[in-house]
Amino acid sequence: MDTSEGSPLEGQPDGVTWFAPASYTMTSAENDRKRRGLTAALQWQSVDEKVTATLEHINSDASLIWREYVVASGDRGFPPYVPDAVQWFDDSENGRPLTVDSNGYVTSGVGVSNEGELPLQFRSRYNYNENTVNDTSLNLVFKPTDLLTFVVDYQHVDSEQIVHNNSITSRINGNQTAQNAPFFLDLRGSSPTIEYLNANTSNPPDVEPNTNPILRISNGMQQEEHNEATSDTLKLDIEYKLAGTFTKVKAGAYYSEKELTVRNTEYEGWQALGTPWNGQASYNASPQVVPELYDRISYADHFNGNTLVGDNNSFLFPRMDLAENYAQTLREGCGSWIAQGTAMDGSGGCALAYDRLSDRVFSHFAPRHISSSKTERTEFYVRGDFELDNFDVYITGNVGLRYVNYQLQSTGGITLPATARRGTDETGSLYQVMLTKYPSIFALASGESFSSTVDGTDYSTVLPSLNLNFGVTDEVVVRFGASKGLYYPSLIEAANKMVINLDYDEVYQNPAEGKDETTNPTVDLQNIEISANARNAFLEPEESINLDLTAEWYFAPAGSMTFGLFHKRLSNIIRNRQFSTEVEVDGNTYPVSAYGPDNTGSGTIRGYELSYTQFYDMLPGLWSGLGMQLNYTYIDQSGLEDPNTNPIEPIRYNGAGVPISDNRNTFRQFTGLPLQGYSDQNFNIVGMYEKNDISFRLAYTWRSEYLLTLRESEEFVPAYSKAQGMMDASLFYNINENVKVGLQINNVLGTDTETQYQQNQQGTKTDAFSFSTDRRYALTVRAIF
């Protein structure tokens, strides 16, 4: 939060800008992962060994269940009320000072919420993710002569993903947090600490019957996915051996057809349950009335007891099974603790699960949730292998050319904001204000979708390649490679889809109090914003021109050193960017600020790599099984053209004259950002032991800071992972030729993952999320029959 956008803090000098935290989050999660796999193969060979056929089938079924408890104070960073959301005070007399570092960042202080729109939330979240893959392949090898070989490969893959992602939230309303949830936040140590200063945060007292409680179950969220994909691939390779400079020639063809159907409700399913703006309904959903709906969850040992300070360290969360069995929860709670009039379809009843809504066409999904894409890829190639032995240096290599055609077709369309954005109760104040004062905005929030099928990308190119190997001596080999490569966009990115969002701030009759339909209704709207999340069916593959030079020294039978230089010229880089567009609905034209992927920017990645590998078999006895691997890589990114132009959008108007703002997609759009996922430096060291029936590995991996995402989903800022080192270990023992047992340990050192947010164009970063991942142990049995 930039205090130049809000009120000055206690002790802040005139003309000086301070930066203060706008929100905080504490999360605890448990994962339950299961994987089941089956591999079967059948092979046949003719008597004359000229024909070999291999049929293989792989089945994989993996599921991940995680149960998460979240304490969250904040909202997204771009809403205009955020700069004044929290006021900070000094309480040095009680050991809680207000401190500011040399850069103007508040590093400790007593925080008091000052905004009714920002409640303190206690969220129970259940996520089930199952992935099933069936992969069947057939390989045929035909050798009519010793010189000629034909290879035919066919592969068919079916995959399915099912996601149930549900949450239920209890909360202290924003207008109640100043009294009931003040806190002391301290960022001066190695990890943040927080102390709640009122016992009501942990143990909300009873209130007068049928009045606003301090804590209530306020809302729920259901998100569903059911994605299906198929892939068919056919490949033909022909090889003919030659005598002379060219030792063989290879040619072939490749064809693949991939189809993806995406069914995703996104995050449109926010549902009011014990409506926080209605005192009676909130009371019915409070622990005073329905204590059986709550579980007390302790955060005393959060981050090994280093986060939450003081006695107020446990909180009342909705029971996790309420989120796990979300549809059942809605049915059983209707009319008791779940209020009437909360249904997102505006029917006036209770909140409904997705599969009970009338506009569903497949399980949980309405037409607007479903899109499909199909790609066809055709390739032809020819390659010649050669060797030159009439020079002082023995040279081998190959030269090739590959033609590629890539085509995409996608069915999807534009989805308008859900009718729930009008308000779920036709007699409610929000609904009536939007209908009477902003009829064009009311019309936009129809939930309609406009389906279309587009023939998207039709891309063709030629990919040359050259590889040379120089046998300088028997121990030293120098390799050079030059090629052009492609990286294909995912079918998720390349969908024909745009989901339009409608955001606004409600203006209450008394802005200083929280909303209440009876005593403090909505009387107006402000900061109306129309934005969109978009995909792009016209994405082309990323291109790279690759140059590699490597020197390899094999100084021992089990030892080598390698030094390599690489240079990649990238173009058509796929990155998300903000762009402005318009949508016309019922004669009104709406300006839309959209965000999505595009081919934009180019640049260079270059660097070097150094590696060393050796088993010390010269040592006596059992010591001869010792070995080591070292690897260091340095990467320099330069000349990257950033898609963002740091736009400053003026307020615009829709066709009906309603002012439309864009806080979301132009908020903190910084330029000059690096590519995602690339660290400048990477280092690995592996200690090994291989002797008799024992195999041991102890691996340490370190990487420098890298960009996680251009736009984090909550604060809408670039997010980085700080430099990090991790250690893993494994030990395997061969009981006999067919059976092996082992122990694997991940994150031996218990390393935390720490992230930072970039706050301005100058690159100033502040600490963001820290994640503590427990050590993971795996016992393994491998058997071959």
Image (cartoon, helix red, strand yellow):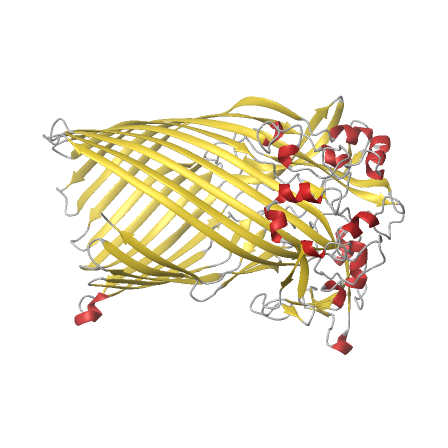
Rendering quarter of residue 39: top left
Expressed as whole percent of the image width and height from the top left, the position of residue 519 reads 90, 47
Q: Locate the N terminus and report the quarter of the image it occupies.
A: bottom right
As drawn, 212 above or below 493? below
Q: Is residue 713 at all visible to an observer of this figure?
A: no
Q: Is residue 629 left or right of residue 95?
A: left
Instruction: Please name whichever residue, 771 or 316, is drawn nearer the observer in this view of the structure.
Output: 316
As drawn, 343 above or below 781? above
Q: How many marks?
A: 0
Instruction: Please name whichever residue, 544 or 164, is drawn nearer the observer in this view of the structure.
Output: 164
Q: Is residue 552 at all visible to an observer of this figure?
A: yes
Q: Is residue 373 left or right of residue 738?
A: right
Expressed as whole percent of the image width and height from the top left, the position of residue 612 reads 29, 60
As drawn, 548 above or below 571? below
Expressed as whole percent of the image width and height from the top left, the position of residue 739 reads 24, 55
Rendering quarter of residue 73: bottom right
Residue at (75% x, 51% y) in the render = 285
Instruction: Please name whichever residue, 410 or 765, is drawn nearer the observer in this view of the structure.
Output: 410
Rendering quarter of residue 186: bottom right
Expressed as whole percent of the image width and height from the top left, the position of residue 719 reads 58, 52
Q: Is residue 590 left or right of residue 598?
A: right
Q: Is residue 684 left or right of residue 29?
A: left
